Amino acid sequence: MSLFFNKKSIVIIVMTLFVTIMAGCSNSSKPSGDAANNGKNSSETSESSEDKNSKSDAPSENSNVETSNTENNAQKAVLDNIKKLSEEGKIINCDFPVKTSTLQDIEKKWGKADKSDWVGEAKGNYATYSSKNVVFGTNKGDQVFEVRSFDSQLKQISLSDVKDFFGQPDHDVTSNGERIIGYKSGSEFKILFVFKDSGNDPKLDHYSVLYPSGTKNNMSGDKGREW
């Protein structure tokens, strides 16, 4: 009886040890909750960081749209200023209007021109003030009949910009490599836009406000320029 009991006790002890060892192995093979969560968080952080880097490297569509809108607004503002001033016979950044200004008026404030050339086709003498980006066309009586602007702001304006703002031109010709379109401004003045670049939508080179009546020569019967 004692021997049977001892054998039975030994079997129970062995079984208990076996179960304990197997349970320990099973627990050690599984990652702890904190370890699993840490691994998951690390993976998510890595993916999130990659997404952010990818988004930061990609160009912003909103930024491009805002830049385009800003440029369009700036061009429209220049064209609006051109239109309003032309009704007074003036160009941008110049206080000397056609019709009522003379070459003497200009020289009193700006001094002598850098150069002066007679242009028969344009019906007058053209005085260039390079530092002002302005050229004045005057008749034989020194009356200003045309003022041209070569302001740097104009270089960003395209042919389509002008047409979109002013509509279809009253005058449209191509001559000597230049595309010239014109619009009436009130009853006395006209605006001429000159494009020199090639292509379907060239950029503006310069523009002028013209007083056609100032190009007439009644003594010789010359009717002067229309545009």
Image: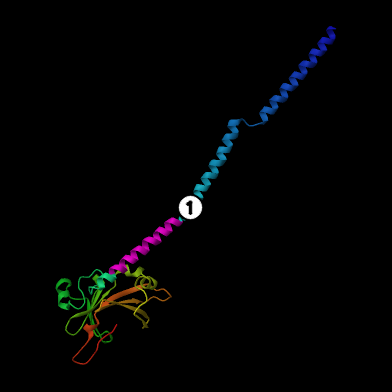
Residue 215 against residue 110 in the figure, above or below = below
| Residue 85 vs residue 16, the one in the foreground | 85
Residue 67 against residue 167 in the figure, above or below = above
Q: What residue type is labelled 1?
A: Asp
User: Please, which residue is most extreme toward the front here?
Assistant: 187
Q: Give the quarter of the image for residue 146.
A: bottom left
Quarter that holds the N terminus: top right
Q: Give the quarter of the image for residue 98.
A: bottom left
Which residue is found at the position 14% from the left and 73% from the top?
108
**Residue 210 spot, x, y in % from top left:** 26, 79
Residue 99 against residue 93 in the figure, above or below = below
Residue under label 1, please give it: 57
Q: Would you say 17 lies left or right of 63 here?
A: right
Quarter that holds the C terminus: bottom left
**Residue 171 spot, x, y in % from top left:** 34, 81
User: Please, which residue is most extreme toward the top here?
Assistant: 2
Report helix, strand or loop for mark 1: helix
Is 127 in the magenta? Answer: no
Figure label count: 1
Does any portion of residue 11 appear in the rendered image?
yes
**Residue 111 spot, x, y in % from top left:** 16, 73
| Residue 23 vs residue 98, the one in the foreground | 98
Which residue is found at the position 55% from the left and 44% from the top?
47
Does any portion of residue 152 appear in the rendered image?
no
**Residue 113 spot, x, y in % from top left:** 20, 76
The magenta segment: 61-81
Main structural element of the magenta stretch: helix, strand or loop? helix
Near mark 1 (Cα within 10 A), the count class, few <14, some 14-19 or many ≥20, is few
| Residue 26 vs residue 186, the one in the foreground | 186
Q: Would you say 77 lies left or right of 111 here?
A: right
Is 74 in the magenta? Answer: yes
